[in-house]
Image: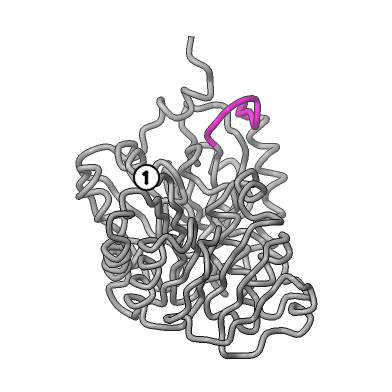
Amino acid sequence: MQEPATRNIVEFEARSLLMLCRAGFEGDAAAEVMAIAEDTAGVAGYCETRSGTGWLQFHAVTGSINTLLNARPDWRDWVFTRQCISLITRIDQLPPGDRVAAILEQLPDSPREFAGLQIDFPDTNDGKSLSRFCRSFAGPMRKGLAQAGHGLGNGASAALHLFFVDSATVFLGLGRPGVTCPWPAGIPRLKMPRAAPSRSTLKLEEALKVFLSPEEQLARIRPGRHAVDLGAAPGGWTWQLTQRGMRVQAVDNGLMDAQLMETGLVDHVRGDAFRYRPSRPVDLMVCDVVEQPMRIARLMGQWFARGDCREAIFNLKLPMKRRYQHVLDCLEAFHAAANGESSAISVRTRQLYHDREEVTVHARVTRRG
């Protein structure tokens, strides 16, 4: 006998996806999902986008949405998509007096059990004005679900997602386990540490949370391990590593934060990030140098080819157009520069919430030949 959690996914077959992204990158997210659908999953479809909204829709014409999602089974495998939701329907002109009833009428007969309820809004200036409305709507919606016989929790796997474009327009969808980011709207809420030398520290903190599980962080980003920070000044990324007890070679001609240097965990090397080499292999190399992305990609590949590092987190600053293709070109250059080590390196690339016109790459040696 199948468990309800299995039926949650199997009995509902979506024909569309709702995908959230950084506002202004809707076309890049669309280029990515179209490429994955056509080249990897064999699914024909089209995207609906509107620039600046922070969301888009993919509609399957032939083939299965589940087949497409199986080609990207982990939310961290999407570059420009923050959140991916299997779409049930869109409701326009919600009656202000009874939005809950209008939503309940559109829910499919199966599943009846949901792992949870997530209510989101666009990450735009206009969208953020909905935050109070969404918070106040959660209680009545939960009550309505219970009265209609829809359970929340109870071992179910698929979560119910409501995405409000405005107070009268909502998308209903299901969050598939693993495919759907665990953070609301795919955004981790991080607090700026007062002691950190710069706001860029949040980029590395988010990268560690995205690319490494809590157990992996404890095992690999810990006291006794050695790291290099290329382009370190004033020390935002170095600060994150020293907070975890790592010893850091901070490479930059600029000045490092004085309090950070007082920790005794940082060796400031005044030099060029493109010429520096560590005296011995390090556990982690991080790089937030502002430079042409192709040049950074090749430099990172060379570090792996020489065996200078076992793991790396670095940023690629992107051009204004054809950004998804540019990411693919940079990753190809990275693997080419890594030479024989390429097949032994696992790579994930994602535009983080704290990134701007850039993406963050995590690369790690998984085996040595």
Is 235 placed above or below 70 here?
A: below
Tag count in the figure? 1
The residue at the point 67 percent across, 80 percent down is: 198
Q: Amino acid at mark 1?
A: Arg
Q: Quadrant of the C terminus?
A: top left
The residue at the point 31 percent across, 59 percent down is: 32
Left or right: where 286 falls relative to 262? left
Q: In terms of depth relative to the viewer, which is nearer, 330 or 279?
A: 279
Q: Which residues are magenta?
A: 148-158
Left or right: where 272 falls relative to 205? left
The residue at the point 62 percent across, 25 percent down is: 155
Left or right: where 369 falls relative to 115? left
Q: In terms of depth relative to the viewer, which is nearer, 212 or 100?
A: 212
Q: Position of residue 337 (x, y in %)?
A: 29, 66
Say which residue label 1 marks.
72
Q: What is the quadrant of residue 35 in the picture? A: bottom left
Is 43 placed above or below 157 here?
A: below
Residue 152 within the segment the image draws in magenta: yes
